[in-house]
Amino acid sequence: MISPASSGQRKLKLLAVTACPTGIAHTYMAAEKLAQAAAALGIEMKVETQGSIGAENVLTDNDVRDADGIIVAADKDVMLDRFAGKRVLSVPVADGIHRPAQLIEQVRDAPVHRGDSPAGGSAGSGGGKERSAAYKALMNGVSHMIPFVVVGGLLLAVSIALGGHSTPKGIEFDKGTFWFYVNTLGGLGFKLMLPIFSGYIAFALGDRPALVPGMIGGFLAYDGMGIYGADANAGFLGAIATGFLAGYLVRWIRKVKVPKFVQPIMPIIVIPIVSTLALGMFYIYVIGRPISWAFTHLTSWLNGMTGSSAIVLGALIGLMIAFDMGGPVNKTAFLVAVGLIGTNNAVMGMAAAAIPVMPLGQGLATLLRRKLYSEQERETGIAALFMGFFGISEGAIPFAAARPAQVIPANMLGGAVAGAVAGVAGVEDSVPHGGPIVSLFGAVGGAAMFFLAIAMGTAVTALTTNALIDVKSRRERGRREAPAALVPEPVPVPLGVGSGGGVGDGANGGAGGAGDSAGTGAAAAAAVDSADDGAGTAARATAAAGAADSASAGAEAAESSGASTANATTDRAAAGAGPSGQALPEVLAGYLTARTVRVELAAREKGAAIREMAEMLGATGNVRDVDELVRVALAREARGTTGLGEEIAIPHAKTDAVSAPVAGFARSAEGIEWGSPDGTRARLIFMISVPEAAAGDEHLRILALLSRKLMDTGFRARLAGAADEAAVLEVLREIQ
């Protein structure tokens, strides 16, 4: 253990680096929490932030030389070589937000960094930078894959509904017709789905040189049967494997020392060719053969079970159909069922009932517990419901790829239920397709029980998925919050070293110092994201100042005409003056003035709140088109909620509907449902808008300061308890 005595009697000195992919909210929230915890424990700490506006408070060679340990809380690559010989603890950035005191304790026993770890590699044992990198890579693949799943699936569904007809071979189309080509386009979307998925997993790990081997590996997983004559395709699980293999293979190749004259062509020629050949040959000769062997024996085994109990066979068919949604296990069950059409249509009935359960179940899950899912997942859930109706099981793949440990077991359980019910009821299907659509084509015998089987399986999948996700979330929240009880409440310290956490817990209807809510870190990256979501410019407050002057004149007129003291106070606040008439200081570099503060919103839902705040910003004269500002802000919300959690929301927009940067603040005592991942309703709401053509990064600095300051529970409590607009501005003045 390192103690202050180990370096004489001087105070323990720690360093930290915080960074997140978007570079604003997570980065500064983690920095603030670490600084607060260090100050409370009497430890000297300097935190370097690597945000969208570049590195700030950069650690110098002298800082590193004198440090007793370094905490790297980052979800992107951070060069660690400068910390050689020092104890380094690498963790995800969310750990810096949720368990800073525990990290400070862990870094004392962290291993010494030897200077040979890769950039962004885990030098410590505090929760896994590498695990975070792998998760980030998987999510990168999922996010790029989703548009292909949705577009391909919906085109297939529409073409089946409007142009398909049932035949003994399945749903077919008249060649050369419009709907034939729509169906073909949908099929192309699905053909690209797995290469994109695998390629962007690899890209996140190995950068551009990994994109080619990743995508080619994804094609092998999608169509190994057509490419090299395999007996089965590996499906999305194979695409995950090829993505990670390609990414880590490229990272390994990049470490190889080569002559200087070869270095320029390494990333564009040597690495892509070598990695593609290595991965491709490994897949064909090593991975492909076991898959083919397993497929052959699985088919034989399943064919031998067709005379067994209908409930057992139905459950088994359903389990296999649901396991990998188009992969080898799914295809084994499906092809066995197809092969029995004409002799035993009941087996195809079992498969047809199980096929739609996965997308229908995942779509229903997003409707039942919306707070467990991101905005993108909720939108994908709607598309999955549509695909499920038409028997397109791939609609559930994005959910299974993102949360395999929760989604795949839930899918299998629901599929087993649907298959077993269909088996017991003797449901039959005469075409090789599944989902409710086949019943509408008249291909199903026992339609009522067919729909009952699908409904039961769907409900089981949805409820089980949400239960498993909820259990995981509670466990993670418990791990993060458990150490908090042992940590003394931080005391106020200067901003930049760590703003003090206040004692208050936020009055009823106030900011609510709810502590380190589990969802805050995840929501922050979605709430205040990269520069292209909120473009920047240097602060210009001329128009706001002119508006304040006009309002000041109105306040004086009101007082001279005998207005009440209360009204005069309100008018002064609107004019930017304090209770005794003195001018209030600019807030957020002049973006936010008394005219853009409201102590209580009338709106009770998000859309109305954004409109009310946009109209408030319009009073400054800096908004050309309120309706357009509202539209852009709502479009931003559609891409992902700007609710941070902790009862905070920061809607923002980049649009030429405003002529100059402008910001506003409003409170809601009742709270507004904002889709925050921690489930809290937004009570403290900031709205920021900048022109599309604005240049510079001043607004990013303000967002960084705001994100950092909002981690101070005392600040939130003071903001919630401020009596009027003038008092609110006095509190906001602390953001400097």
Image: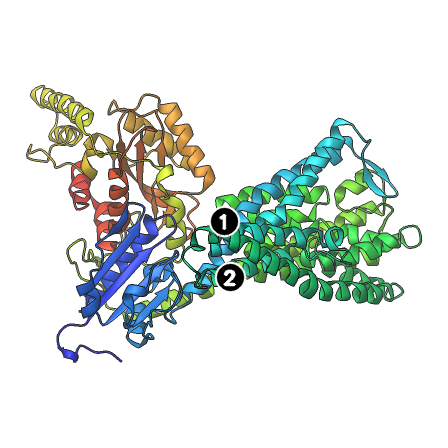
Q: Secondary structure at mark 1?
A: helix
Which residue is nearer to you in this view: 656 or 405?
656
- Looking at the picture, does residue 254 appear above or below residue 730? below
| C-alpha separation, residue under disc 2 versus residue under disc 1 | 17 Å
Query: What's the amino acid at mark 2?
Result: Tyr
Q: Give the residue pinned by disc 2.
A: 248
Which residue is nearer to you in this view: 707 or 292?
292
- Across and down, in percent, residue 65 comes to 20, 69
Q: Give the residue pinned by disc 1.
A: 268
Callout 2 crowding tier (Cα within 10 Å): few <14, some 14–19, many ≥20: some
Q: Earlier in the sequence, mark 2 or mark 1?
A: 2
Foreground tag (2 vs 1) = 1
In the drawing, does residue 241 fall left or right of residue 435?
Answer: left
Q: How many marks?
A: 2
- Across and down, in percent, residue 708 comes to 26, 51
- Looking at the picture, does residue 367 appear above or below residue 14? above
- Looking at the picture, does residue 55 appear above or below residue 152? below
Task: Report which quarter residue 90 is drawn in.
Answer: bottom left
**Do we see residue 464 in this rendering?**
no
The residue at the far right in this view is 343
Residue displayed at 24% across by 42% down: 702
In the drawing, does residue 37 fall left or right of residue 77?
Answer: left
The quadrant of the picture occupied by the N terminus is bottom left
Find out whether the residues at labels 2 and 1 contact each other: C-beta distance under 8 Å.
no
In the drawing, does residue 657 fall left or right of residue 195?
Answer: left
Residue displayed at 33% across by 29% down: 614
- Across and down, in percent, residue 728 comes to 20, 41
Q: How is the image coloured?
A: rainbow
Q: Secondary structure at mark 2?
A: helix
**Do we see residue 293 in this rendering?**
yes
